Image (cartoon, coloured by chain):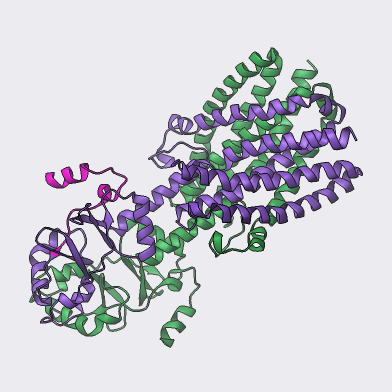
Chain colours: A purple, B green
Amino acid sequence: DAQEVLELMRHDPETAGGIMATGFVAIREQMTVKETLEYLQVYGEEAESLSYLYVLDEDGILKGVIALREIVVSPFDEHIGPMINTNVISVRADMDQEEVSRIFAKYGFNSIPVVDENDKMLGIVTADDVFYVVEEETTEDMEKMAALAHSEKDYLDTGVFGLAKQRIFWLLFLMISATFTGIIIQGYQKELASVVILAAFIPMLMDTGGNAGTQVSTLIIRGMALGEIKLKDYFKVLYKELRVSLIVGIVLAAVNFLRVWIFHHDPPLAFTVSAALLFTVILSKVVGCTLPMIAQKLKIDPALMASPIITTIVDALSLSVYLYLAKTIYINA
Amino acid sequence: DAQEVLELMRHDPETAGGIMATGFVAIREQMTVKETLEYLQVYGEEAESLSYLYVLDEDGILKGVIALREIVVSPFDEHIGPMINTNVISVRADMDQEEVSRIFAKYGFNSIPVVDENDKMLGIVTADDVFYVVEEETTEDMEKMAALAHSEKDYLDTGVFGLAKQRIFWLLFLMISATFTGIIIQGYQKELASVVILAAFIPMLMDTGGNAGTQVSTLIIRGMALGEIKLKDYFKVLYKELRVSLIVGIVLAAVNFLRVWIFHHDPPLAFTVSAALLFTVILSKVVGCTLPMIAQKLKIDPALMASPIITTIVDALSLSVYLYLAKTIYINA
């Protein structure tokens, strides 16, 4: 009705208040099971969910909750007082819907009451609403991680121009960013002209850096979205990544050393490429775990700090190191 | 109890039968509301969920369902017969849990009955179980899309060697695959030695191809996971991507043409790089939509055909075209 619409309009649509339903059953603690059921026979129809009945005082302050299933398994003449759970988990109307979905995931409720700053009950959020929110938020994260602008519509329902628009900004931005890597290569034109084989390892270094960075940024972004990784874990994460990247980098560098040695019969070349590879792996893991957490700290969505941006940054840094190593220890040595 | 464990052991853990609970309330259609409530007072305690009561015949065949909320809002002396919904949505015990989660998402139920091939009721799956399944499956998809092996444990609970193991196989595989791109570049050593500036555009082409491919593969993989895109839509998707990539490719190529022209004062070079860029964008969109759908067709998880593999393939093809164009229309012209 009109009052419900007004109530919902007061709240940001991406908060608990914005997704809540205002139809719920409020009861008083003096009732018996039979009285409660008779009350439901009169007022229950209107409620969004009857899974939980809410005990409010005269001012509408939330005092407790009873699961409907506790009512229906109890004898008719029992008083509901002792069944009331006064330790209610509720959410504030201004809580972000993603945070609300984490509370559902944690407790596994069917619905959660929404209250204002004075604990006055305003409505309920049901698992349904949140199920939808989780799917939506995850899709949004995936879009950001793939350098796509957000689209409300399904792929098949989006027109060709809509799809193009969703993609073009980030592609242009990243294309122009990749120019820096080109400028770095230009700075080593003399070296590349004299030892053209150096160019043959550029794709391998770029791809490995991109892949290694994507692996860790995906783990961190997903971990933060699920609430498993928090900002305060940063140094733990960084120390972990340094050790992981050392192991992974040494294995990759060793395999690469053998490969270049066997196919090119040139141990100094093999050493140069492998040293650059080890550096690339370590760098990409450090950048890949750091950027999403900095974004979170700055209240930017960490999902933006995913594969595309990390790849662009790691490319520029790792090619700089590769060409510098090639110049100083391979060509000039 | 032991019988419940035996029942669950008969089912693949990733199916409806594997995640169901076997405690549910079965009632008969002759009951009144009051008799139903009295029945719940005796047998309701054991059930996993009381949101729905299931009407079974003498052989345990599922005949209908009534929401508990319909019972509790109805007068005590009413017969439940007319309230029974005989159009029950149920799932077969061998249905994959991902499919089950799609049915929850579609209908928004709190629980769904699980039946065998004869419609005999075996148990129920609740929204809780599925909420967890959806998060799990999405995390697995993201891991695959980021070239990570699956890990059951949270990031912070996984040791350094566990994390290294999760990453090393794909990085090695992709590193060795990237060698092919290196071999292609080696084949054009003469051209690169004579016009070293050509190497400066390799990172931009590789990154743009990777990003453009990731955009579409992410949309397709996510769309298929949510059931929005089906295999039969392939030609519709392909036709769409051809048109989108033409628009996106022409815009990027035009911007790039201006950029190279302004900074290098060399229109033929600008033309060569931009033509290769247009080809790269179209190719990456075609490969990016085709590979995940082929994987689906072959019953391989489409999430494996994401960014890393697509980038590796697109890199090799687009650099071949770039260097071939550079040789034939730029150097030899």
Residue B251, image quadrant: top right
Which sits in the foreground, B175 or B327? B175
The answer to which of B130 and B104 lies nearer the viewer is B130
- In the image, residue B27 sits, relative to residue B145, either above or below, namely below
Asked if residue B306 can be seen in this view, the reply is no
For residue B141, side relative to residue A245 (left or right): left
The residue that appears at 16% across and 47% down in the rendered structure is A4
Query: In which quadrant of the rendered image does the C terminus of chain A lie?
Result: top right
Residue A318: give x, y in percent of width and height. Answer: 71, 38
- Image location of residue B291, percent across then percent down: 59, 46
Q: Quadrant of residue A121?
A: bottom left
Image position of B254 with respect to A4: above or below: above
**Chain part drawn in magenta:** A1-26
**Residue closest to the eye, B269 or B250:** B269
- Residue at 91%, 42% in the rendered image: A266
Residue at 16 percent of width and 71 percent of height: B71
Q: Is residue A213 visible?
A: yes
Q: Residue furthest bottom?
A: B2
Given residues B296 and A208, the one toward you in this image is A208
Q: Position of residue B233 (x, y in %)?
A: 48, 44
The percent coordinates of residue B125 (x first, y second) are 37, 69
Position of A42 relative to A277 (above/below): below
**Image-based side of A275 in relation to B53, left or right:** right
The residue positioned 10% from the left and 63% from the top of the image is A43
Q: Describe residue B132's horizontal placement relative to residue B174 as left or right.
A: left
Is A207 colored magenta in this rendering?
Answer: no
